[in-house]
Image (spheres, helix red, strand yellow):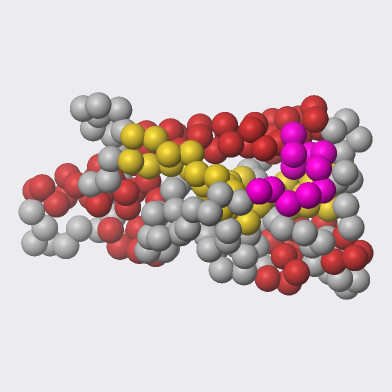
Amino acid sequence: MPQEIILLTGDIEGPHLAAELSAHNPSLHVNHVDGADTLRDALDMTGGSGANAGRRLVAFCTGVVVPADALAALPGPAYNFHPGPPTYPGSWAAGFALYDGTTRFGATLHVMEEKVDEGAIVEVDWFDFPADARLRYDELEVMAYQRCVGLFRKYAPHLASDDAPLPLSGERWSGVKRTKAEATIMREPPRDATEDEIRRRFRAFGC
């Protein structure tokens, strides 16, 4: 049974997700961290994975890139809840999905690897856009976030009380990995952009 979960997420989510985990294992210590430096502080980085026995890393909707040495210091798989489907790895998943004209989206629970959004997938919670909906990126982000919460609640009992790795789904990453820098560029339409292109970018990126 896990002794400690290092929970990498924001300050708003931290207390709520920690309570969810603790409800399934009252003896579990949940250590909330919010960045790569505090993550390293929470781990024994000198003694190898054996020094961190009983620890598990869970990341939830965070933009923090976990360093390779931190992943290597863990005794088992670390998991990430990504607010986007495997077709949209990386940053601004909702924005690029809307810009592409996609009408199906989702949230992904996957194993963390050194490279962002490339680890084996545990589950994807897919959903279709509401009929006739004209979603903006922030609305789609909320929908994906809610699906991440649902996945977290589904897997919290296992994460909190079972040392075994989560079973894998067999789904694969397939999309182009996007970055924040690419999203920033998309928020600045060229001078010769058509009115339709400007509206398309505004809907997807809020430019």
Residue at 66 percent across and 52 percent down: it is 79
Q: Is residue 196 something that shows in the picture?
A: yes
Which residue is nearer to you in this view: 7 or 186? Answer: 7
For the record, the magenta segment spans 157-167
Report the side of 111 relative to 134 (left or right). right
Up the image or down, 8 lies above or below 156; here it is below
Tell whether position 164 is magenta: yes
Of residue 121 and residue 144, the one placed in the foreground of this image is: 121
Q: Which residue is drawn at 23% across and 32% down?
A: 134
Give residue 23's quadrant in the image.
Answer: top right
The residue depicted at 30 percent of the width and 37 percent of the height is 136
Q: Nearer the viewer, residue 93 or 10?
A: 93
Relative to 16, does residue 192 appear above or below in the rendering?
below
Assign the N terminus to one quadrant of the image: top right
Query: Number of numbered discs present?
Result: 0
The spot of residue 5 in percent (x, y) is: 79, 46
Residue 103 in the image, given as x and y percentages of width and height: 28, 40
